[in-house]
Amino acid sequence: GAGVSQTPSNKVTEKGKYVELRCDPISGHTALYWYRQSLGQGPEFLIYFQGTGAADDSGLPNDRFFAVRPEGSVSTLKIQRTERGDSAVYLCASSLLGEGGNEQFFGPGTRLTVL
Amino acid sequence: AQKVTQAQTEISVVEKEDVTLDCVYETRDTTYYLFWYKQPPSGELVFLIRRNSFDEQNEISGRYSWNFQKSTSSFNFTITASQVVDSAVYFCALIISGNTPLVFGKGTRLSVIA
């Protein structure tokens, strides 16, 4: 079956612009996560959805970042007034809900470059 | 708060050597799950193993083995007879109970030279 897909694979934008990054999780996976990975670092948590609602958005760095998952499947991460420091690979993962510790399946990521 | 430390930033070995990647974790929770992921040059994170905090049995899968020791809060990963295809960045990660986000270490870059 299809894995987690993310579009676009690469996005180059100018400082101050608005961008949207899309994640299509594995069908049937209720949990969806967004992470950000800077060069030479491990992925860092941004936001986590259970179904349509954000269960934990404590990782969003500031109010320029926002994510939605209106129908409980596809999610969009939105970044307003982009800054050069937002340049990173944005990773999406999905998993089944359960007692915990379920394997998270990762997408290939979107590499965002802010010039 | 949870924390994962991978003290080895980069390791380089010659093909067929054995190599161990270290992982030390911190959590106050008694129920937690430990993971290893592989990130090859293509960039996609590949799941390798999950271990829950109540199961300290070591595990072997082909050339891969994992040593979980709660007494030292470590979950080390050994590759036996390394191959060039093992070259990647390896991440250790932690989840506390529930569907919470993964807390990753900074990763260890392994280079296997032919």
Image: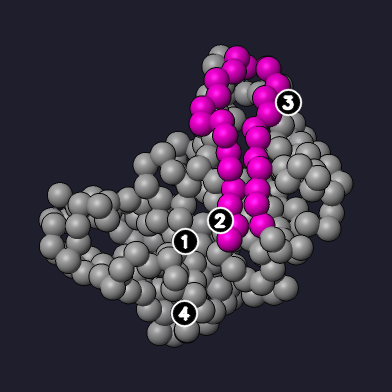
Measured as percent of width and height from the top left, residue B75 is found at 72, 43
Disc 4: which residue: A54
Pointer 2 indicates a residue of which chain?
A: B
Measured as percent of width and height from the top left, residue A65 is found at 30, 70
Q: Residues within 10 Å of mark 2 (few under 14, many from 20)?
A: many
Real-space Cα distance between discs 2 and 3? 27 Å
Real-space Cα distance between discs 3 and 4? 42 Å
Pointer 4 indicates a residue of which chain?
A: A
Which callout, 3 or 4, points to the residue nearer the camera? 4
Q: Are marks 4 and 2 in contact (CB under 8 Å)?
A: no
Q: Which residues are magenta?
A: B1-27
Real-space Cα distance between discs 4 and 2? 18 Å
Query: Does residue A37 appear to the left or right of B5 in the view shown?
Result: left
Pointer 1 indicates a residue of which chain?
A: A
Mark 2 is on which residue type? Val
Which callout, 1 or 3, points to the residue nearer the camera? 1
Disc 2: which residue: B103
User: Do callouts 3 and 4 point to residues on the same chain?
Assistant: no
Mark 4 is on which residue type? Ala
SS type, badge 1: strand
Q: Are marks 1 and 4 in contact (CB under 8 Å)?
A: no
Q: Residues within 10 Å of mark 1 (few under 14, many from 20)?
A: many
Q: Are marks 1 and 2 in contact (CB under 8 Å)?
A: yes
- Establish if B5 lies above or below B14: below
Measured as percent of width and height from the top left, residue A9 is found at 33, 54
Which callout, 4 or 2, points to the residue nearer the camera? 2
Disc 3: which residue: B80
